[in-house]
Each structure stands twice: as structure tokens, then as C-alpha cells.
Image (cartoon, helix red, strand yellow):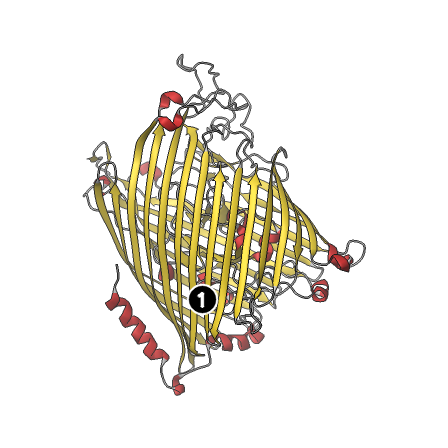
Amino acid sequence: MSFPRRTGGLLLVVMSIGGLGGEAMAEPLGADTAKAGEETQAGPTPASAGVRGGAAGSASAGAGAGAAPPATGNGRQATVAAKTEVVTVTATGLSHASASTKTRTPIIESPQSISIVNREEIELRASPTIADALAYTAGVQSEPSGIDSRVDEVSVRGFGAGGFSSNNNFVDGLRLPSGGQWTRTSFDPFALQQIEVLKGPSGALYGQTAPGGVVNLATKRPTEKSEGEFFLQSAGFTGMDNWQGQASGDVSGKLNHQGTVLGRVVALARYGGTQVDDVMLGRYYVSPSLTWKITPHTTWTLLAQYQRDQGGSTFQFLPATGTLYSSKGRHIANNANIGEPDWDTFDRNQALAGSFLEHKFSKYLTVRNNTRYTYIDTLYRATVLSGDTLKACPPSVAGCVAGETVNRRAVEGRGRSQGVATDTQLEGHVTTGPVRHLLLAGTDYFYTNWEHSRDLVNASLVLPMLNIFDPVKRGSAGYANALAPQVYTSTLSQQNGIYFQDQLKFNRLRVTIGGRQDWARDETLNILTQKRYNTRSDAFTWRAGAVYLFDNGLAPYFSYAQSFQPQVSDPSTALNGVPFKPTKGDQYEAGLRYQYGKSIYVTFGGYQITQTNMTTPDPNGTLCGTTTCLVQTGKGRVRGLELEGRATLPWDMAVIFTGTRSDARVTQSNTASQVGNYLPQAPKWMASLFVDQRFRHGFFAGLGVGGGVRYTGHSYGDTNNTLSIPGYTVFDSFLRYDFGVAHPRYDHLSFSVNLRNIANKRFVSTCTAVSACYYGQGRSLTARLEYRW
């Protein structure tokens, strides 16, 4: 599906602008920004390397960076310099993120809020998942549906931004393909250079997205500097009865004497136990990449990734009685497994191949093309609940104990998904009088083809769990030969968009204006009934905002942005039998930022997000088959305040602090009792504090200690607000020793221990029903021996 007239015309116009005579040209905006940075402390220099104290390498590997010369991969400096530099915060307002403007613009100059977690912070905290890496980020709730080894589930400003909950899954600025119920991608933090969170609607650059925000994963790329790392790691869980081991390696550098060909290989192998008893997981990952500097002005990067996940899954349905509510004064343990280990399985093959090409016609005109192919297949088997803990025992359940027994069901799901995403961008620099413009125009396209099947095991074979407090497996014999089809679906999705953006600079004022037109189509086939339906979702979205950079480092900002998200569902559930329109989102945001040199960055802002076209039951109760028809008159609103700060203090201490206040409500619904209720899975308060203290001299030279505290406030699990989820607080800590600081002959060698949820606090992340409650991450201890060069 293509739109040559729409896309080609716009690109020709922008190319003609880029070819204006020299009198109309200006110095590239980035170059001028570097000069302004001396005055405003908001230049484009990447953030310093983080808690280890080297150069940042935080320039994104995503869409905006294209195939630009790569940044230093792990931010290492010479040994002597590393010993004398102060500790530096991981990312500040001087950092770049392709998720912001698809250009190399410092995030302090973006009118929308952006947070970055780079390689150094990920490694300091030994984050095992993407969600864990984002645990100290304002406005982000990590693992909102509890621990889940299958996906990277996070929510931003109350809306899903990854995993199963949304289509906001981006890697290197390109959308990942969607899939069936359980066919999704997952990425290991070791594969990433940084994680970027663009908060608020992002339709103007990325098309269909949820209104809360976008999480973009920037993968590791080849570096000009020859460097590498290798580590051995072991992790234990809850009572330290379950352990897993991991070996990881990363080697990068020049492949020829001229330095025109760069290469990198990243690999890891992990296997062992998890938080949940009898759940063993294995992950095997390899990613070779090659950068070829074809000419001084042309760079081409090729990147491949393969990941194999196999074993079980830490995700499980838990009953409200025994988790959210006590049963007989007791609660289910953090490590309890109420499934069937011999049946429960999650296997995934995930492969990606990408091309990132950039050519600079001059310092005024650059063209980029980023393209990636993604393939996924999954097998998921699970034994889950079919109700809450039994309060009374029926005669049909042999061995039942009231308050301890729960009925179960078992399912099998298979899925396959493949897709192509491509994004072509044209960037130009021009001036109009005293105003300098950084112009961006582009067109992107993605195609996804996926199939999914879900079968239900014959109920007579699935025995209840007799004691949720001391679970003993009941056996899964015969499950594989007693499957009945439930859902068999095939879907083809396409989206084509054209977008434009103008970043204007007038003295210290930065203004961003952009818009995008999308044409999206989804063709869905019910394989069992052979019923087919099409959903078309065309939308124009735009954004605008401004930032003013004062001499003293203060930067007030304001922005407006829009989003849209197709609602792909059987039109027979709609009152008029017509496919649903996409939901629409818009956001107003304003706030104040402060950048002090390269060491302190603080941002505080308020926002309001409104989502419309949400489905709600027909007020007249009209039936569509056996259920009430749906109409699109629902509306939700999220108002919030966010505070995030990253500071480097003179005594070798780095501090990260965040605070979030959110008020997420149903403002319009045909279910009168829901109006004014809180939206589900949207905590009212979140806060965190993380401290990293280094000792570079004296008896403790080489030692690093620190930790953090994370608070998640009260929320509701359902729109009716009947499932009240209490808040919780967990504590983390770490101890690190760099041998080379005090013992030069052991330079580059380090040992670290990280402890999450020190007290092994049992908490419920959320409950979507009385048979669907989910525990959060319990205690884990990670010990790592690492060598870098």
C-alpha cells in the first residue's frame, strides 16, 4: 500500500528548499546551538558518562541519529582520567534522544518532556529488564501488571507504552510489529545503548500511538574506539533458593586501518531459576553490526539481532483472596507457583535485520533512510485461574479446603508475526531574516502480517490447586491431546504517513511546530468462521511548543500535542455496525527546567491529557448478538505533575530523584456509576530517590555504595473502582568495587552486588478481576564480575 502522490510531492518541496542559494543559508542549527550552549548551558554536548565518570555516548542510535558517526559506546575514559574525574549523572538536558524530534537536539530544547536512561545507569543498577531500568523515571510505572518475563511492560502517564498493553513499541526510532495475544518482542537491557521516554502524545512524528508516551530503545552500534567488556553474573531470588547464571560479552572497534569500517558484536547467554518456583528461563542473544563510512559524507550501518527465549513464564494469575485480601489471615508467597510447571511454557524466536543509511549533501542538507525487518514466533502454554479462591467447597471438588482451593483452566497459544518498517527523512537548515530553521520532512511506512491461535484444554483434565499457600502440582497429563479451538485470527496491518517539522531559533527562543497525516488499514480474518472485516483509520495530528533558554540555566516551556490509535475490533459489536473510529488524544503541558553546567538537570511540569472516542455501552441497552452494543462516547482525562532531577555533587555523589502526582478520571461514560471514577492502573502518587556514592581516595578507594527507594501510591484495578490496590514502598541497594583505582595492575576489573526489594516485600501491582491479581518483583540479588578494556 503506497501513496506516491502524497509523499513524493512533499519531499520534492523540501528538497527544493534545501537547494536555496547561499544567501538564504545559515549555519546548521546544531552548530549554532553549540555556541549558545556556552551562554545558556544548553548546548548539544552529550551528557557525561554517568556514574562511572567518562564521556556519555548518549547520542541516540535511533531515527534522528540515523547513520551518523557513532558515539563512544560505553563512555570509557583513560584510566588516569577515570580516577580523577568526578562522578557524573547519567543523562541531563544536554543529552540527545531521537524520540524527541528525530534530530540531534538537546532534550532541554524540546517542548515535550523527555527522560533518558543510558548504558551507564543500566549497568550500575544491573537492570535485568527494560521495565526495571525505567523504575527511577518520573511518570513511568514499571511492571504495572506485575512481573512478566515475556515482555517489557511499562506505562507512561497512565497509558500503556510497551509490552502487551499498546503498540508503542519502538526500537531505533522504528515501530515494532504487533502480534496476536501473546506474540510480542522483548529486549535485553545488555543489548541497548540507552532508553528514551518521550512523554505525551507523539502522533506528529510516529503516527498511531497511545497518548501517554513512547518508549524508544536505542541499540548498541559500532564505535570508533576499540573497546569491550565481558562479565559473569549470578542472580538469586526471594529466599535465595532459586538462582540463574549469565555470561555476556561486547566487543567493538575499527575493522580496518583507515577506520572506515567499524564492527561490533554483542552476545549473552542466561539460564536458571526465577522468582517463581519451578520456572526456569533461558535466553540466548547475539547481535553483530557493521558501520561503513562509504565517503566522508555517507555512512551505512547494518545491524542484525537474534534472540531465543525458552522455558516457562513468571507471569501468573493469582486470586484476590490470598493476595489483595488475606485468606485465613494468610497471603500467597512471592515465589509460589500455582500453575503446572510441566505444561507452562513460553518459547520465542525473535530476529531483526536493520539498515541505517545517512548522506550529507552539505552541512545544510542531509537525507536518511532507516529500515528494519522483524520476525517473531511464540509458543505459550499456561495454567491460570477460573475464579477466586473458593469460600465454600462444592462436593465435586475432591480435597477442597475453603479459603485455600482455587479452580483453574489451561490454554495454549501459538503466534507468528513479521513486519517491515521504513522511515525516510530529509533534514535542511535555512534562515528567514533573524530566524534559523531546522526543517525535517519525511515519510514512513510499516507493514505487519501476523497469525494467532488460542486453544483451551478440556476442563475435566485441569484439576484445581488445593492449597494456594503450599502449592503442589496436580499434573498435566493429556493436556496436549485435549485442545479445543477458541480464537484463530490473522491480521494484516499497514500504516503510511508523511510528516514535517520546523524547529525555529530566534536568539534564546526555541519553537517547534510539526504535523503528520496517516493512512492506516487493518484487515482481520477470523480463521474459524472465515469472517473478514476491515478497519481504516486516517488521521492528521500536530504539535507545537516553545522553550526559552535564560542565561541562568532556567528554561520555561509549553507544548500542545495530539495522538490517535486505531480500534481494531469486530464491527458487529458497534451499535451501527460500522468499524470504530480511532481514539484521539491531546495534551497541554507547561513547566520549568534548570540546567547547571553539565552536572545538574531538574525539570518540573504539569500536563493534562484527554482521550476521546473511548467505547462505552449503548445507553439504550441495544443488543449486538448476546452483548450490549458499544458506542464511542467515552472520554478519559489525566492531569498530572512531574518532578525529575539528576545531579552530580562535588563529593563524588550522583543523585536521581523523581515525583509524580496523577489524577486520572473517567469524565464521560454511558455507565453513570463510572463517571468521575479513577482510570485503572494509574497510581495517584509515585516517587523515587537513588544515590550513588564513590570513594576515589583513601582506605576505601575504588568502593562505590548506594541504593534507592521507590514508592507507588494507591490505584484501582478496574473502571468500576471496586478493586482498590494499596500503595507500596521498596528499597534497593548496591555495592561496587573497581579494583584498578587502588590496585593499577587489576585495572578494568570490577565486582558488584545489587539487591532489589531488600525486604522481599510482597505487594500487588494490580488486579483486573478477582481471578487476575499480579504480584510485583520480590527480592533479587545480582552478583557480577566484570572486565572492561
Which quarter of the rendered picture does the N terminus lie within? Answer: bottom left
Q: Residue at the right extreme? A: 699
**Residue 449, position in %: x, y?**
31, 49
Side of 84 where 273 appears, left or right? left
Considering the numbered disc 1 on the image, is that residue within a helix, a strand or a loop? loop
Q: In percent of the image, x 44 and y 14: which residue is there?
A: 398
Which is nearer the eye, 212 or 427? 427
Q: Is residue 386 visible?
A: no
**Residue 63, position in %: x, y?**
43, 63
Q: In percent of the image, x 24 and y 68: which residue is there?
A: 5
Side of 774 where 785 appears, left or right? right
The part of the image, by quadrant, that contains residue 617 is top left
User: Label 1: which residue?
Assistant: 66
**Residue 141, position in %: x, y?**
49, 46
Q: Is residue 592 visible?
A: yes
Which is nearer the eye, 614 or 534? 534
Count of numbered circles on the image: 1
Which is nearer the eye, 340 or 444? 340
Above or below 670: residue 121: below
The part of the image, by quadrant, that contains residue 456 is top left
Residue type, numbered disc 1: Gly
Which is nearer the eye, 385 or 674? 385
Q: Residue at the bottom extreme? A: 23
**Residue 534, position in %: x, y?**
23, 48
Classify mark 1: residues with Cα within 10 Å, few (<14), some (14-19) or many (20+): many
Above or below 525: residue 399: above
Above or below 763: residue 82: below
The part of the image, by quadrant, that contains residue 378 is top left
